[in-house]
Image (cartoon, grey):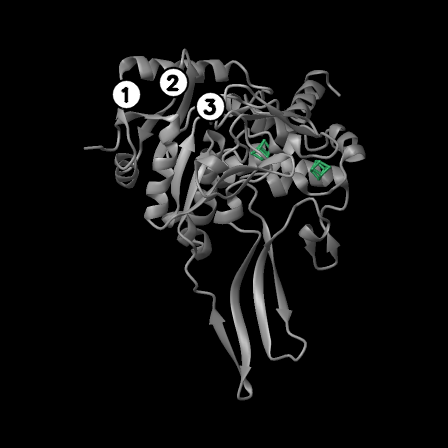
Amino acid sequence: MTNPGDALVVEARELDALLRALRERGHTLLGPTVREGAIVLDEIGGASDLPAGWTDEQDGGHYRLRPRDDGALFGYAVGPHAWKRWLHPPAVVRWRARRDAGAFVAEPDTAPPPLYAFVGVRPCELAAIRVQDRVFLGGLFVDPAYRSRRESAFVLAVSCGCPGGTCFCVSMGTGPKAGPGFDLALTEVIAAGRHDFVVEVGTERGAEVAADAPHRPAAPADLEAAAAVMASAEGRMGRSLDMAGIKELLYRRYEDPRWDEVAKRCLACANCTMVCPTCFCATVEDETDLQGTATERRRIWDSCFSQEFSYVHGGSVRTSGGARYRQWITHKLATWLDQFGVSGCVGCGRCITWCPVGIDITTEARAVRQGEAQGS
Ligand code: SF4
Ligand code: SF4
């Protein structure tokens, strides 16, 4: 019998049996797959859709896929998509209204979300989901659209054995080993003629799914092999960020000349907020049909990099690019701590990789720290 807290070993060739067990329970599988030169998250049918034998090369404004010769199924870091795409989708219908006998009838959108299984959730992404849980579920107002998706989703996490060039989860305390919040967590072990997964069971439903796949109990040597994968990954982070006193630093450096300098490079394209797994800001738009008989209200993603985002009566509060970048990085690394009790950055590196001009949150934070030290 399999229970939460157990550790098992599943051969790599049996991973599909684990995924089949999820499909048989009605889950739609979402996981990493190769598309258009990137590893994206999308619906997958099984293990054969995973990016076997691929890795990624990441740097500021740079992403390329490269083949690897060991057939690893999870031998890459995070791509452009985050799980918020399904938990906090880019567009959510809040209600619809139609004209009916001279009056309007409003109907909330109550369609239940699909029953998802998230396959390959990385530790930084697990941390990001915990951050968004605080935002959407932890305050005075609970977001029903987020809650229904979150409660039903099965989380199959994968600890990171192959961090990317822009990763800094070690600095943020979010990886490379999967933290709390998973149903099952895998560590891929490829060494000395073995290719398998050491599986940690996190929940009862995780135990039920794991029991359906061929497995054996993990021996001490298996746990040591998984720990060695983590130790190696910890030492290969592409970036680091000194978090000591960063909140106070950013509050002190409101007028730092670096904000104007970064504004000369920033295109205000909002890519950084779109790819970030914790950014949650949204706006609301209404749309009516041409006959005026039906209307729909949608919540859509928004970004603090647009001028309209800070519009209040009479104009925008943050008209300069420097003010908008300062707002973003200060929210991520400082005010988020006051607002939600955690950092708004989990160290996934996406905003660095997918910034078209390679603006780097770790470089900018370091520059502000150095500027203060040099008295500028
Ligand atoms: S920091 Fe980079 S990704 Fe973000 S808005 Fe500026 S140019 Fe775009
Ligand atoms: S701020 Fe950048 S590195 Fe931090 S969580 Fe967001 S996308 Fe990842």
Instruction: Identify which residue is drawn at 18% across, 33% down.
Output: 1
Residue tagged 1? 218
Query: Of marks 3 and 1, which one's residue comes earlier in the chain?
Result: 3
Q: Where residue 288 sits: x, y (%)?
A: 63, 72
Q: Nearer the viewer, mark 2 or mark 3?
A: 2
- Image quarter of the C terminus: top right
Residue tagged 3? 176
Camera-nearest residue between 308 and 180: 180
Question: Are circles 2 and 3 on residues that touch, CB within 8 Å?
Answer: no
Q: Is residue 344 above or below residue 153?
A: above
Q: Residue furthest right?
A: 264
Instruction: Give residue 326's quadrant in the image.
Output: top right
Mark 1, secondary structure of its residue: loop
Q: Where residue 296 sits: x, y (%)?
A: 57, 69
Camera-nearest residue between 114 and 24: 24
Instruction: Identify which residue is drawn at 26% across, 29% down.
Output: 5
Q: Is residue 259 left or right of residue 343?
A: right
Query: Of marks 2 and 3, which one's residue comes earlier in the chain?
Result: 3
Query: Of marks 1 and 2, which one's residue comes earlier in the chain?
Result: 1
Instruction: Give residue 262's quadrant in the image.
Output: top right
Distance from label 3 to label 1 (Cα)?
A: 20 Å
Question: Are circles 1 and 2 on residues that touch, CB within 8 Å?
Answer: yes
Q: Where residue 84 sits: x, y (%)?
A: 51, 44
Residue type pointed to by label 2:
Ala
Q: Nearer the viewer, mark 3 or mark 1?
A: 1
Residue tagged 2? 226
Instruction: Give residue 275's quadrant in the image.
Output: top right
Residue type pointed to by label 1:
Ala
Report if the beta carbon of the residue with label 2 is closer than 8 angstroms to ligand 2. Answer: no
